[in-house]
Amino acid sequence: MEELMEILEDVCPDVDFESETSLMDDKVLSSFDVISIVSEINETFGVRLTPAEIIPANFNSVDAIWDMICKLKGDKA
């Protein structure tokens, strides 16, 4: 989770990811932010996100993003 937080803070340093739970619903993240985050997740965690995973529900909070990564890696969240 620490690596994920570093990625998110690098992409959007002004966002409080620890408390925000509507990153997509409230348009806190732009589509460019999501593309950057997806690219970093792919590289850092060795997973490949498909268009099926790149949906608002998977990017609304840090926990949602982390759960998605864990599922892709076959880990338990």
Image (cartoon, rainbow, N blue to C red):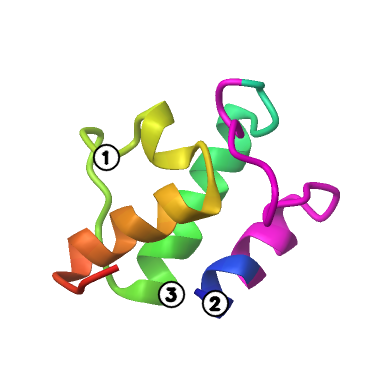
On residue 40, the disc is none
Residue 67: image location, x then y, percent: 33, 57
Circle 1/circle 3 CB separation < 8 Å: no
Name the N-terminal-most of marks 2 and 3: 2
Pointers 2 and 3 in contact (CB under 8 A)? yes
What's the residue type where badge 3 is placed? Thr
**Dot 3 corresponds to which residue?**
44
Gap in angstroms between the C-alphas marked 1 and 3: 17 Å
Residue 47 sits inside the magenta stretch = no
Q: Does the magenta stretch include residue 8?
A: yes
Residue that carries the numbered disc 1 in the rendered image: 53
**Tag 2: amino acid:** Glu
Q: Which residue is at a point 30% across and 68% down the rendered structure image?
A: 77
Frontmost of labels 1 and 3 is 1
| Between discs 2 and 1, the one toward the N terminus | 2
Give the magenta-colored segment's residue range: 6-25
Query: Could you tell me residue 10's position as x and y percent?
Result: 72, 63
Q: Which percent across, then down, holds residue 27?
A: 66, 22
